[in-house]
Amino acid sequence: MTTSALLPTSWCARPVSSSAWRVESRQTPRPGPGQVVVAVRTVALSGADNGRLGGPPSTDSSALPLTERGWAGHVVAVGSGVSARLVGRKTVAPTDSPIPAVVGSGSGLREAGPAAYTLSREIAPVLWGHVIVWEQDLHLLPDDADLRSAALLSSGAIAMTAFEAAAPKPGERIVVLGAGVCALLLVQLLAAASPAELVVVDASPERGALAVALGATKHCSSLDAARLEDTFTVVVETTGSTEAAQASCLLAASEARVVFTRLFPPGTLLDRVQLSLRRLTIRGASVASPVGWSGAVRTLGTGILDPRPLITRETALTDGALLEANSLVTVVLSP
């Protein structure tokens, strides 16, 4: 059983250019009271989750922002007040890795702030080999869980939160704007709710084809094409673009539910007339709820949520490029 006194040397990976990373050794942090140390075994990276409805994704890897990051690992040490039986358990958690102010202190993930919970902004491109998590924030996985798939559960939790907000009923017509990581996982969940129609709008034919393979009934390459499909009972906007935010209300039927998984750019306005006349219900899901996390873990176990088709590249953690153009999700394997 690993104790905090016997923790191995850890690592971190930092960007040294627009496309290259450097792996460095660092001291493993120690848990404080009520905390655990998790050894990160897999990291899911995506620089392509910024949906683009007006054109194809960029093929320039140097221009890819790191918009999403998730991880999975196992507990290697516990602080006081935490059961030692957690050591060895596979887990994920709803926060990103912190940068401890003092190495070896009990700095917790709560200090990472709200940016760790949202997919609506770029995040600091630093990867850590060990993270500190509060015990109550752990979401334990089955012993046979695939940690490569589990690394995408941060996106899965957002998708499940959006699913709960949408509250789909069998036979409804649903449209999802965007086909990024979160949107594609959401398609799997929505397809299981037996909709009459599930349309995905995205400029990329490759992502559209993947959405159909994951359960969508149709792919539209533009908002104009989606408008020809009539209106929808449920609209889920996942891109965070001004155009899509405004179009969401136009695609919604009377008394429809409209869900946004990203924050809008500053100055974005929704059509108040449409909101009023159509009696639309607007809900936000940019922050994964506890129910979203528990639901994502549960549906991963049942197979309803299956991130494996989204993983387009796996790579060992070495010096060099971790993100590549045209890679939807790269899973980085820890030493």
Image (cartoon, rainbow, N blue to C red):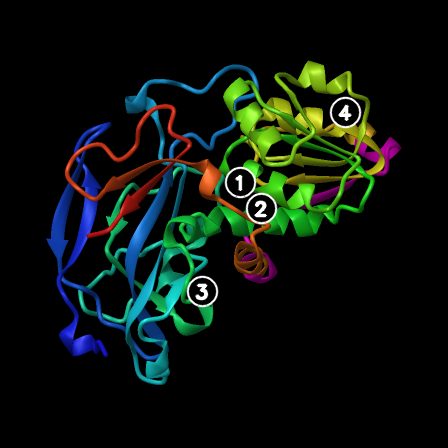
Question: As shown in the figure, which amino acid type bears the numbered disc 4?
Answer: Leu
Name the residue carrying label 1. Answer: 182
Structural distance between the alpha carbons of marks 1 and 3: 20 Å
Q: Please, what secondary structure does the residue beneath circle 1 have?
A: helix
Could you give the CA–CA distance between mark 4 and mark 2, rounded to whole angstroms? 23 Å
Residue indicated by mark 2: 159
Q: CA distance from mark 1 to mark 2?
A: 6 Å
- Residue depicted at x 66% and y 48%: 163
**Amino acid type for the residue under numbered disc 1:** Cys
The disc label shown at residue 141, or none: 3
Task: Find out whether the residues at labels 3 and 4 contact each other: C-beta distance under 8 Å.
Answer: no
Nearer to me, 313 or 32: 313
In the rendered structure, which amino acid carries the disc numbered 3?
Leu
Q: Quadrant of residue 325?
A: top left
User: Residue beneath label 4, please?
Assistant: 250
- In which quadrant will I find the N terminus? bottom left
Tell me whether the residue at label 1 lies in contact with that at label 2, contact meaning CB atoms closer than 8 angstroms: yes
Label 2 secondary element = helix
Circle nearer the N terminus (3, 4): 3
Which residue does the image show at 38% across and 32% down from the upper left?
47
At which x and y percent is residue 228?
Answer: 77, 16
Give the Cα separation between the discs numbered 2 and 3. 18 Å
Contact between marks 1 and 3 (CB within 8 A): the answer is no
Q: CA gap, disc 3 to disc 4?
A: 41 Å
- The magenta stretch is 275-294
The location of residue 194, given as percent across then percent down, is: 75, 43
Along the polypeptide, which appears first: circle 1 or circle 4? 1
Q: Position of residue 253 (x, y in %)?
A: 83, 31
Q: Earlier in the sequence, mark 2 or mark 3?
A: 3
In this rendering, which labeled residue sits more in front, label 4 or label 2?
A: 2
